[in-house]
């Protein structure tokens, strides 16, 4: 049974939708395993990143002997579906859950309720706001992921003496932490002075043509790229929040006859994205490891259910760092990277 069915009750009245969620969820729970109930709540169930994350959680749940219940938003930014998913897990008596917040601030009251009930809450990939609203965060260092592709792009443009005209293709208007960190990391890596490090779009550098939003999707990337090309057809460097947005940006550039002379950088390291590095669509991408991220999260909740143990942060950081690796077939001096062959062997492991 696809758990995404449990979050689509919004077409009913609010009260009936809530009842539907609880009843459907309870039935799904009884059909699961015999162990403790744990949850996984992702931003969507269509983005390949979250599909891989779900696979990692399922594999780890089977190994740990826990009953995994999964939920997802209808699209990026869908906070209400995640609120309803937490309510379901509370009604199940779950020991804890993993969540990639669609709205890092708005989800906090629901997380507070779950923790008051004794559940362990682990944010995956995207920290809550404030970060300590969750018991722990298992994530890529998203600032470092952005900085790596920024450093690579700077080295490439400096080597050729090319003046950059930069398009910034972000996630959405919510300024969620992962969006902000990648954006600001890229700018810092490229040598652009930012204003408030916690705010997208307040920099004052003539090299930045503009920002637009993509919802992390191919269609959104295409539209955002079209919008920014109208603003300045001479754009030659494109930052994208993720690889689906990068694929859409490339299609817009190809339609405009600019696909051969514009460099695209991104973050994800999914297998399709690595293929796009190999095919010259993406110049460089920062690889994350969502399967590892989710597996470690499930192991942490299973340990907590057994003896109350809580996860410890990585040395020198405020979260559990699950790693990042720059992937490119156009290496630049001074920027450590792996090629697309390595990327194909390790994508999203």
Image (spheres, rainbow, N blue to C red):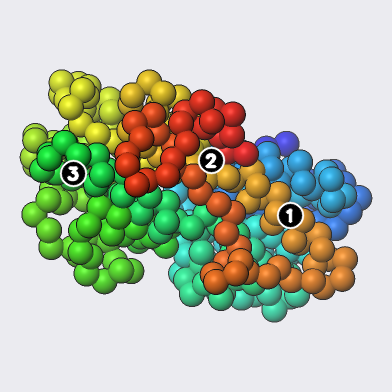
Name of the residue lying farthest toward the right: 34
- Residue closer to the observer: 239 or 127: 239
Q: Mark 1 near mark 2, Cβ–Cβ under 8 Å?
A: no
Residue 129's tag is none
Residue 49's tag is 2
User: Considering the image in quadrants, where does the C terminus appear?
Assistant: top right
Pinpoint residue 60: horizontal percent, then vertical percent: 77, 46
Q: Which quadrant of the view contains residue 84? A: bottom right
Q: Earlier in the sequence, mark 1 or mark 2?
A: 2
> Which residue position holds label 1?
298
- Residue closer to the observer: 269 or 58: 269
Q: Which quadrant of the view contains residue 3? A: top right
Report how far apart the C-alphas of labels 1 and 2 lie in the structure.
17 Å
- Residue closer to the observer: 33 or 92: 33
Residue located 15% across and 51% down the image: 208
Asked whether residue 347 appears in the rendered view, the answer is yes
Residue 158's tag is 3
Pinpoint residue 303: horizontal percent, then vertical percent: 82, 63
Report how far apart the C-alphas of labels 3 and 2 lie in the structure.
32 Å
Height in image: 82 above or below 106? Answer: above
Q: Earlier in the sequence, mark 3 or mark 2?
A: 2
Which element type, helix, strand or loop, lies under badge 3? helix
Q: Is residue 349 left or right of residue 223?
A: right
Pinpoint residue 51: horizontal percent, then vertical percent: 59, 38
Q: Is residue 306 left or right of residue 227?
A: right
Asked whether residue 227 appears in the rendered view, the answer is no
Residue located 46% across and 61% down the image: 103
Pinpoint residue 142: horizontal percent, then vertical percent: 44, 56
Which element type, helix, strand or loop, lies under badge 2? helix
Front: mark 3 or 1: 3
Q: Which quadrant of the view contains residue 81? A: bottom right
């Amino acid at each position: 049974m696809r758990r995404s069915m449990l979050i689509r009750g919004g077409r009913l009245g609010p009260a009936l939708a809530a009842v539907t969620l609880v009843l459907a969820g309870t039935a799904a729970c009884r059909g699961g395993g015999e162990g403790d109930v744990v949850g996984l709540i992702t931003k969507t169930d269509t983005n390949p990143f979250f599909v891989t994350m779900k696979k990692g959680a399922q594999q780890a749940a089977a190994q740990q002997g826990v009953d995994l219940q999964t939920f997802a938003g209808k699209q990026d930014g869908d906070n209400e579906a995640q609120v309803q998913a937490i309510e379901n897990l509370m009604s199940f008596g779950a020991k804890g859950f993993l969540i990639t917040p669609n709205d890092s601030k708005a989800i906090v009251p629901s997380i507070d309720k779950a923790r008051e009930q004794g559940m362990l809450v682990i944010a995956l990939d995207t920290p809550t706001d404030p970060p300590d609203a969750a018991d722990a965060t298992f994530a890529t260092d998203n600032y470092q992921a952005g900085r790596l592709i920024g450093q690579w792009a700077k080295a490439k443009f400096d080597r050729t003496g090319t003046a950059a005209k930069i398009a910034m293709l972000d996630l959405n208007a919510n300024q969620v932490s992962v969006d902000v960190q990648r954006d600001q990391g890229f700018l810092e890596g490229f040598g652009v002075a930012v204003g408030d490090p916690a705010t997208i779009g307040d920099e004052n550098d003539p090299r930045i043509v503009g920002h637009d939003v993509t919802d992390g999707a191919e269609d959104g990337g295409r539209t955002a790229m079209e919008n920014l090309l109208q603003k300045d057809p001479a754009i030659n460097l494109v930052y994208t929040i993720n690889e689906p947005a990068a694929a859409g940006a490339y299609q817009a550039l190809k339609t405009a006859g600019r696909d051969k002379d514009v460099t695209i950088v991104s973050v994800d390291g999914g297998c399709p994205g690595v293929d796009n590095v190999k095919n010259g669509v993406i110049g460089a991408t920062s690889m994350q490891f969502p399967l590892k991220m989710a597996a470690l999260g499930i192991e942490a909740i299973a340990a907590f259910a057994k003896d109350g143990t809580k996860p410890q942060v990585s040395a020198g950081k405020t979260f559990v760092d699950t790693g990042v690796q720059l992937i490119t077939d156009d290496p630049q001096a001074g920027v450590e990277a792996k090629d697309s062959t390595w990327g194909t062997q390790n994508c999203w492991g």
